[in-house]
Image (cartoon, coloured by chain):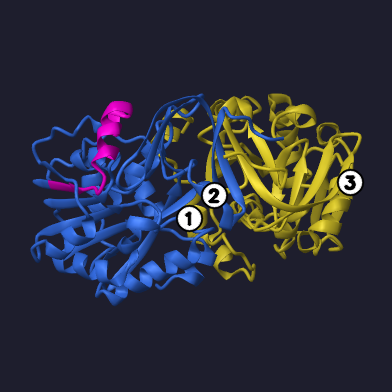
Chain colours: A yellow, B blue
Amino acid sequence: MSLDRNWFTETSSQNGIAFSLHIIAKLHEEQTSFQNIAIYQTTEFGNLMVLDGYVMLSDRDNFIYHEMMTHPVLFTHPKPKRVAIIGGGDCGALREVAKHSGLEQIIQIEIDERVTRLAEQYFPTLCESNHDSRINFKFTDAIQWMANAPTDSLDVIIVDSTDPLGHAEGLFTTDFFRDCRRVLDSKGLLLQQTESPLLHLPLLQSTHKFMREAGFTSTRTLQFPVPVYPSGWWTATMAGDNITHFRKDDADNATINTSYYNSAIQVASFVLPNFLLEALPE
Amino acid sequence: MSLDRNWFTETSSQNGIAFSLHIIAKLHEEQTSFQNIAIYQTTEFGNLMVLDGYVMLSDRDNFIYHEMMTHPVLFTHPKPKRVAIIGGGDCGALREVAKHSGLEQIIQIEIDERVTRLAEQYFPTLCESNHDSRINFKFTDAIQWMANAPTDSLDVIIVDSTDPLGHAEGLFTTDFFRDCRRVLDSKGLLLQQTESPLLHLPLLQSTHKFMREAGFTSTRTLQFPVPVYPSGWWTATMAGDNITHFRKDDADNATINTSYYNSAIQVASFVLPNFLLEALPE
């Protein structure tokens, strides 16, 4: 059957698949200096944000992505105080990061301020921590920002970017990772979203390679479901010099309210299927 | 954008989503006594089987589903000898089961013989064990078959069914589970596919309830990705009286070739996110 105009469809032509959400209305659309932003109201997935035709998040399932992009890396670092989020304009990762009471400084570097302004309007629950006094918003190019940031000034960097196309392409390079490594102190950790393990395995492999070329001695991929992303299955990759540490007691005792994440999920998310074990470095 | 006629689309109207695969050709279509069967050649996912408009499997990703529907339950049972597969006409689960050299008797009860005949033609690798002398095919109604099967005559039952609609609806009932329990011996285990944890949580909950009403003292859900199924995220639920046992050494030492499954994946697949821990019985 074909879908009528009451559906939003994201086509992944290279992968030969498409994913559609039934919509009630288009709530907003604008062209910014960086991209086209559209907001839809869907029948079953709440509000939906789309950037240049690619689904960014839905109300219904974003909790999985945002919890898994934040809590595993923050509970791996021995004592995180200073965190930067690259991208993340919808503020969902920011909200999860802000749940960690030990943090002192949280910087979010998003290139397109309109993403954040529209998130405040259409995804208000994701933005409920935006006025936390520890948070500093920078609406600027993250690659440039990282190149100029002081050495040893961060504990954790979370790259919550769009797909490696257009302005996000430079976030998946050895040069960018080398800047991240310089800006992180010696115990610092980098976590980057690395797409679908089924559809984007070459990108996942090159990200490990580039992170190691940049000087990180260890890299490790974790996996989780994201039903609105192509294949419904997604990864993030962590880089650092000690990435097997886990503050499990802190994770168990923290008064952090989560719908997906728990300490057992943290451990399980790093367990990889055979074809990934064969494709990725140890 | 809208998709032209070169796409096969499965619409999950109740869930407000649709999933499409880009097709090169429709290779076959027929109406059997039980259902409509269509086989497509896709651009990126190999061959695709569709029953009554619902995606059953693709060449590219079926390994995950078939490995996770079989090896976890077989390595949980202390010494399986006699296994029945309910449904499973594509023979993908059967191929995985047949990899276990300790089994003596494997019965597959599929209602629609045409599914198996078309799998032999269009998914030959899934059928490569079909001539194993331990395998006995029964093309008949599994509910009736189970009602008449001898008491204590099986060690493991795997229900690899379609969605709980039409002829598969009776497989998700207390009556059917009670028959399974009678036919299993005291160490016997049942494993049933139980749909998407995000989209079909009420079904998952009722399956646990019905399995326990049927007398199984323990039930436990495992999860895994299935990119071609709605939400890309799927579950199976195990029932028995000792379902936490795991023959890990056997899993590690078995000469079973798998692309997704390994012993660490078995353990990780049973780790559930918070919202499922809250929704399901312990």
Query: What residue would you read off at disc 1?
Result: B196
Tell me if residue A191 comes above or below residue A163 in the rendering. Answer: below
Q: CA distance from mark 1 to mark 3?
A: 34 Å
> Identity of the amino acid at label 3?
Arg
Helix, strand, or loop for circle 2? Answer: helix
Given residues B21 and B188, the one toward you in this image is B21
**In the drawing, does residue B235 fall left or right of residue B137?**
right
Q: Is residue A220 magenta?
A: no
Give the crowd class for mark 1: few <14, some 14-19, many >=20 residues within 10 Å.
many
Residue A52 vertical position relative to residue B107 in the rendered view, above or below: above
**Residue A117 has which mark?**
none
Which residue in the protein does label 3 denote?
A114
Evaluate if marks 2 and 1 touch, with contact meaning CB atoms under 8 Å apart: yes
Q: Are marks 2 and 3 in contact (CB under 8 Å)?
A: no
Q: Is residue B176 above or below residue B140?
A: below
Mark 1 residue type: Ser
